[in-house]
Image (spheres, grey):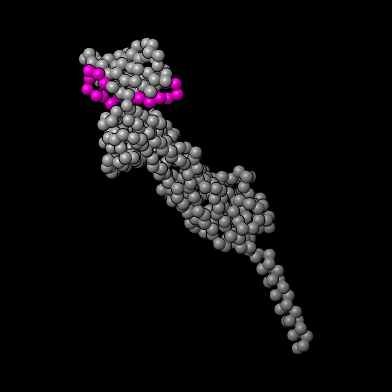
Amino acid sequence: MEALSRVLSWIGRATFIVALLWSSLHAQRIVDIQLATLGPANLCGDRQIVVTIGLSTPLYVSDSLLLFEFVVGYNPAKLQFIAPLFIGTVADNADYTGSGAIDSATVRVYAFNVTRPFRGSGVLCGLLFRYRGDCPDTTGIRLVYEPEKNVEAKISYGELGAAIVSAIEQSNSSLTAQFPQDSLSVTLGSRIELPLTITIPSERVRRCSFHLTASEGIVIEKVTLAEYDSLTLYVESSDSSSLQAWIESPSVLRSRDVTIKCAITLNRSGRAQLIVNPGHPQCACVSAVAGDSVTILVSKDLRVSEVESHALVWSRDGDMWKLWNFPDQACELDWWDSLGRHVAKMSIESEPVILRADNWNPMLIRLRNGCVIRAILR
């Protein structure tokens, strides 16, 4: 009996050892699946984003992994799937690779070797997406189903990771609002239409707001578009010294100037200033905005003879005079230098009229009805 007991004990130990060896040979390593994004999508560039799929540990030949397939879900309102990526990954030289859309929000990506197990560390594969939205935002990407693998593989999948895709604006474009001159001389009580140019960069601006502010002495009457096209000008609020408005287009305003006529009245002597500040367009890849100001002075030298007072406007730009806001019947202009010598005579065909400047220049404007306007530019 004692000999039999020893034999049975030995058989039991041998069975346990065999079972342990068999379990060790067929044990599966648990690896986590990791999703990651390579940088944010740039709304002002190509908008592309790469999502990678990798494992938490390297793959070994002993893992016997011949096949992997992942089903990835995403928000189709924000992302568009472009293509799978295998170059430079663990599956770079796989016998078969590919992808396929299951529906508009799900895509499968796979790789398969016939006899060679996958091995190496790093990314198993990647997916290329394009961001659809117009504004900075985030969206998630996740594994929808349990990933597939060949039944002989000696690994099992643990945690299924997820990733966040971010979209940002990276641009050096600026939007500017500018008056044509730094200062103007006008007659007291005159109503003039001062041009304001908003320069739109070559981005996707559809709407642009601006705020006009006038110091004491200037009354803001109204603003209108200088040209009539698909643009629409809306005035949000206004009073005598402040006006808030915006321009809007049904399509993108790419790289163009929009001219707005600002009708103002100077009603008191002294220095007055008109200031414009453009608003920052939202979701338009504009990184900065810049406003402008113009100083308006009462001209003491504008004298009108044989014609009712008219709001002629002029300013000096280096060694040149710029004149505009001529009467409708203005047809010809004479001017003299500061020594009284006649300089030239010219027809008035368009605005602004540009003359070479002296210290001061007497000037005469002839109208078609026979009247004249006399002024001294200084």
Image spot of residue 71 (x, y percent)? 50, 53
Q: Quadrant of the N terminus?
A: bottom right
Quarter-wise, where is residue 156 in the image? Answer: bottom right
Residue 329 seen from this side: no
What is the residue that sits farthest to the right in this orientation? 3
Left or right: 27 in relation to 265: right
- For the residue pair 163 and 354, the one nearer the viewer reads as 354
Residue 211 falls in image quadrant = top left
User: Principal SS element in the magenta part?
Assistant: loop
Residue 359 vertical placement versus 193 (above, below): above
- What residue is rendered at 36% in x and 29% in y? 184
> In the rendered view of the protein, which quadrant contains the C terminus?
top left
On the rendered structure, is 284 left or right of 192? Answer: right
Could you tell me residue 106's position as x and y percent? 46, 51
Q: Is residue 308 magenta-colored?
A: yes
Which residue lies most toward the bottom here? 1
Q: Residue at x 36, y 21 (%)?
A: 377
Q: Nearer the viewer, residue 289 or 124?
A: 289
- Residue 240 image position (x, y, % from top left): 27, 40
Asked whether the viewer can see residue 213, the reply is yes
Q: Residue at x 38, y 11 (%)?
A: 341
Q: Nearer the viewer, residue 347 or 68?
A: 347
Q: Residue at x 26, y 16 (%)?
A: 372
Percent position of residue 18, x then y: 71, 71
Q: How many marks?
A: 0
Where are the magenta residues, as a range?
A: 304-320
Instruction: From the viewer's perspective, tell me whether residue 297 is left or right of residue 162.
Output: left
